[in-house]
Image: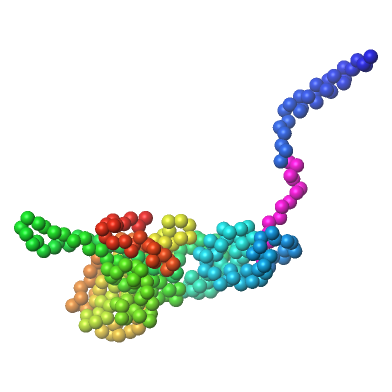
Amino acid sequence: MNPVPSEVELESALHLKTVQYFVTQRPWLDLYGKHVRPVAPFGSASRKSCVDPALIHRCLPDELLFEVFVRMAPYDLGRASCVCRKWRYTIRNPVFWRTACLKAWQLSGLVENYKMLQSKYEGSWRKMWLLRPRVRSDGLYVSRNTYIRAGVAEWKITNPVHLVCYFRYLRFFPSGRFLYKNSSQKIKDVAKCMNFRSCKAECVFGGHYTLSDDKVEAAVLYPGMRPTVLRIRLRLRGTVVGANNRMDLLSLVTSGVDDNEASGPEEDILGVVEGWQDDETHNPDVPAVSHKRGLTPFVFVPFEEVETSVLNLPVEKMDYYVSG
């Protein structure tokens, strides 16, 4: 015969069932205390010897992998960080991004770059690379412009028109110099001559630029019997964070310069025209003109994409282009 439970035991059992009813079961709490340590980057003090299952990591030492990443461009580093977790943690090493930042903003100087790093970007070179505006030197900025020109009427019942397409090309260098070309040629043909060796033979003109926040001031000199300076004001932006793949053309002004100003080095022309008004000219034979047409935004095209870019399409296949 089973003993009859006492009143205290019944109350205790009822209380236990009530507690179990209201307590939510959390099986993931059993995982607490079981730490899964990510793969430490190369050179980390917390690094321990372990066996990596990936074949490339067993065959390629970490020291050689580090040397490969050092020689890669910043945008290639971003793509490589998507390969695996080990590469992502290794590429976060500030050594890679410090080199890229100091090269991209070498005009600002070493001291100014370090001051801005601490004041605006919390000491992170990678954050500085992503958030600080910069001009890209690994490709060309292209502005595609079109206009309609009336043709010659062969018959009285016809009135032909032509859709004319031309491009403005800009190539920037970290040293503060840039190349400018205005042509109807497609980008795959122009990219071959956008260098200082063949610039004069291909009507490519060199100039100087400065970068202040997201504003770019540039000037290029057209030599000849009546020297003319082209003053360009641009604003940097990007379709995504860190892209810097668009440039809005704020103003485009041509002005005349005298013989003394035109005889100086090409890179000094920006200092000559600094502070000029839009209607200012130093040669009465060349009036100042502020252009209101042909101000389509510039689109950045990397060198590896110049052969496949949609900007190579003819007018009949792409009569209108939205730069975004």
| Residue 220 located left or right of residue 238 | left
Closer to the camera, 294 or 107? 294
Residue at the image position 42 percent from the left and 68 percent from the top = 303
Instruction: Note whether residue 285 is visible.
Output: yes
- Quarter holding the N terminus? top right
Which SS type dominates the magenta stretch?
loop
In what quadrant of the picture does the C terminus appear?
Answer: bottom left
Q: In which quarter of the image is residue 280?
A: bottom left
Query: Relative to 275, is 90 above or below?
Result: above
Residue 91, position as x, y percentages in the image: 60, 64
Left or right: where does residue 78 sit relative to residue 292?
Answer: right
The furthest residue to the right: 1
Tell whether position 32 is magenta: yes
Q: Position of residue 64 (x, y in %)?
A: 64, 71
Q: Give the range drawn in magenta.
A: 29-42
Q: Tell me what residue is drawn at x 71 percent, y 41 percent.
A: 28
Residue 115 point in image, percent of width and height? 54, 68
**Relative to 36, residue 210 above or below:** below
Q: Residue at x 48, y 60 (%)?
A: 242
Q: In this view, does 322 lie above or below 301?
A: above
